Image: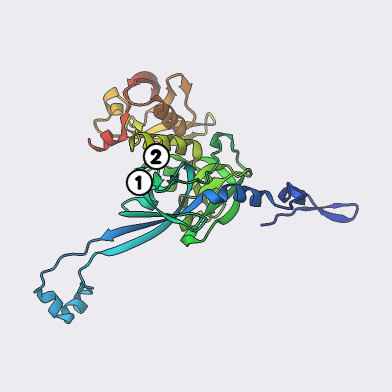
Amino acid sequence: MSLSIFYQSNGISQPLINPKFVEPNKFSKKSFITIAVEKTGPSVVTIETQKYIQKRNYRDNSQLFLDPYFEKFFGLNLPHDNKPSIEQNQGSGFIFGDGLVMTNAHVVNGSDKVIVGLTNGKKLKAKLIGQDLFTDLAVLKVEGSGPWPKAKLGDSTKIKVGDWAIAVGNPFGLENTVTLGIISNLKRNVTQLGIYDKKLDLIQTDAAINPGNSGGPLLNSRGEVIGINTLIRSGPGAGLSFAIPINKAKKIASQLIKSGKVIHPMIGISLIDESNIDINKINVKVGYVVRNSPAEKSGIMIDDIIIKVNDKYIETASDVTSIISNNGINKQIKILIKRRNKFISLKVTPTDITKLQNR
């Protein structure tokens, strides 16, 4: 990728951007991309999954097998060999601890067998430690003694829009496929993408993420992992890719390693960021209240505007989600709402999202 902007100076066109930005080391002549990938690339793995599909059982004397016209008429492909079939898929991941691999939950969900391929060519069996479908994260434990090439985890709170983003993965088993882009947005709410079964804000980048790159690392210019590649936007807005912030991933991974599951504090509301032109700010409005949820029991209603949670004034829906997540479950929070022209103070006790689903 090259980008040059030219201006006239003494009759000679020169690049406005210093071409040496890709040569941080004038002796090695290596670009920052090469250095970053050499640093973290060995930790990137290929994940191969197998799922056994059990075919329907038919009686040996079933007349269905005796009439080929029956099959043709109904468009059936009846299993004359009734053995289970194997569904195979691939994805990427990276080693972040002693034999521990972080990847997307959708890469390994429902798999009966998981094989991890290392950059040295070795293929090892792996066991699923835990997965969290709400954040699309999973942790695997690879069989073996190491030593393991570990990725250095960065700090996703320190990245800024416009920073370099390097997406690395092993799509279709191809070692260390690399694409380059920039950080386009830091808190892209998944509901803005039409995704309602996940619970997280994503890093948006224009670095191309291929389907086989799912679960691979998104790096900064120093080769530190700042995110986990997870989604590719198709249709309107195609070309945009998304990654789970590494700080969020570290918290989820820690819970998965400790207990095999993740607690997601919720009060049972969906929120809408609504522009208020009159006062030039965003109103965070309640769009839906789950029946029998802590929010409904506390008195929160549709169209209420969230003004403050605990001692923090609310600017976006993400602020509410973050405060509730950090608060934990079974611990009261104070919420100040505005209903029509009246301010109302309420107390709500968050519960785990799985309990909301069972209501």
Structural crowding at the residue carrying mark 1, measured as other residues with C-alpha within 10 Å and reported as few (<14), some (14–19) or many (≥20): many
The quadrant of the image that shows the C terminus is top left
Question: Which percent across, then down, holds residue 6?
Answer: 79, 54
- C-alpha separation, residue under disc 2 versus residue under disc 1: 21 Å
Residue at 24% x, 64% y is: 84
* Side of 64 relative to 243 (left or right): left
Q: Are marks 2 and 1 in contact (CB under 8 Å)?
A: no
Residue 197 can be seen in this image: no
Q: Which mark is residue 31?
A: none
Q: Quadrant of residue 78?
A: bottom left
**Which residue in the structure is indicated by mark 1?**
128
Q: Nearer the viewer, residue 20 or 354?
A: 20
Question: Which percent across, then down, holds residue 122?
Answer: 46, 57
Q: Nearer the viewer, residue 38 or 120?
A: 120
Q: Which mark is residue 199?
A: 2
Q: Amino acid at mark 2?
A: Lys
Q: Amino acid at mark 1?
A: Leu
Residue at 56% x, 51% y is: 41
Count the marks. Answer: 2
Question: Which percent across, then down, holds residue 133?
Answer: 35, 44
